[in-house]
Image (cartoon, rainbow, N blue to C red):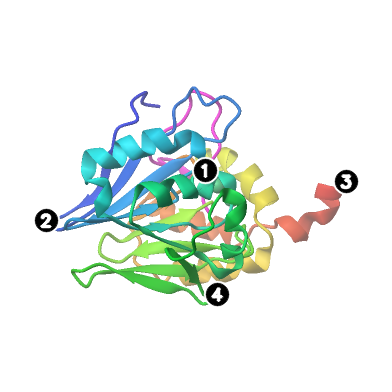
Amino acid sequence: MEKDSGVKVLYENDEHRFLLLGWSEDSEEGAIQTNQYAIVDNDEAVLLDPGGVHVFPRVLANISEVVPVNKIKAIFYTHQDPDVSSGISLWLSSTDANVYISNLWVRFLPHFGVFNFSKVKGIEDKGGTFKFKSGRELKFIPAHFLHSVGNFILYDPNAKILFSGDIGASVFPKGERYVFVDDFQKHLKYIEGFHKRYMTSHEACKMFSEKMKKLDIEIMAPQHGALYKGDSVLKFFDWFEKIKCGVDILNEIWG
Ligand SMILES: [Fe+2]
Ligand SMILES: [Fe+2]
């Protein structure tokens, strides 16, 4: 794992970029590692799951290297977990961005310090879109129960990158992280435990995987751990559509 927390370009053309804003520092003992991403279209930026309070200064520094903070037009949250969205009030007070999150979680936001809802845009269960000034769109795709009950992932058709939130997340032992999955079979040991316990049901995994296999995806970028590229994207969905998890294995979990 590289020690730097610099910005990596995942896709780039003259007008549109998809960026990994850097990995959380290794020194975050006790906190799950998180990835943050930004999509920049001409001079407009969208942040994806910019994370909790403790990574806010680093993520703000990372995005400031790329665009002035007042060019952040939207912040997309896959769900309500603290590692995803507990920094929301800091972002709302430092940017002019609108915030997009499942309608199910809007009423919980005051508990993260949000009292002004004028910039909060609830996403309906069936999903939605964000449109840049260029006309290019980002799609909010339902992924409910994977794991949150109000859960969306984001597809960028221009970059052909799927931001998958907790789906595909890997948890590495300290010092063993890599950026891209090279060998899916060897990678399994870093994803099995997380998906079995956090994902809620085989039915949801199967339905979601079938939909995702129809999308043109070059990179799948989760909120934790390594990214999937090329072959490994399909290998992931072949595995994910078959797993038993959550309510399927209650006996195992409850003991
Ligand atoms: Fe989560
Ligand atoms: Fe997460």
Whether residue 45 sits left or right of residue 228 in the image: it is: left
- The residue nearer to you, when weighing 58 against 224, is 58
| Local secondary structure at mark 4 | loop
Q: Name the residue carrying label 1.
A: 185
Mark 4 vs 3, N-terminal side: 4
- 181 in the magenta segment: yes
Name the image quarter holding residue 104. Answer: bottom right
Mark 2 vs 1, N-terminal side: 2
Q: Name the residue carrying label 4.
A: 125
Q: Name the residue carrying label 2.
A: 14
Read off the magenta span. 167-184
Q: Amino acid at mark 3?
A: Gly
> Disc count in the image?
4
Name the image quarter holding residue 4. Answer: top left
Mark 3 vs 2, N-terminal side: 2
Return the x and y of residue 127 as percentages of the image width and height: 47, 74
Q: Which class describes the residues within 10 Å of circle 2: few (<14), some (14-19), or many (20+)?
A: few
Tell me if the residue at label 4 has its CB under 8 Å from ligand 1: no
Mark 2 vs 4, N-terminal side: 2
Mark 1 vs 4, N-terminal side: 4
Q: Which class describes the residues within 10 Å of circle 1: few (<14), some (14-19), or many (20+)?
A: few
Return the x and y of residue 58 as percentages of the image width and height: 38, 33
Q: Amino acid at mark 1?
A: Gln
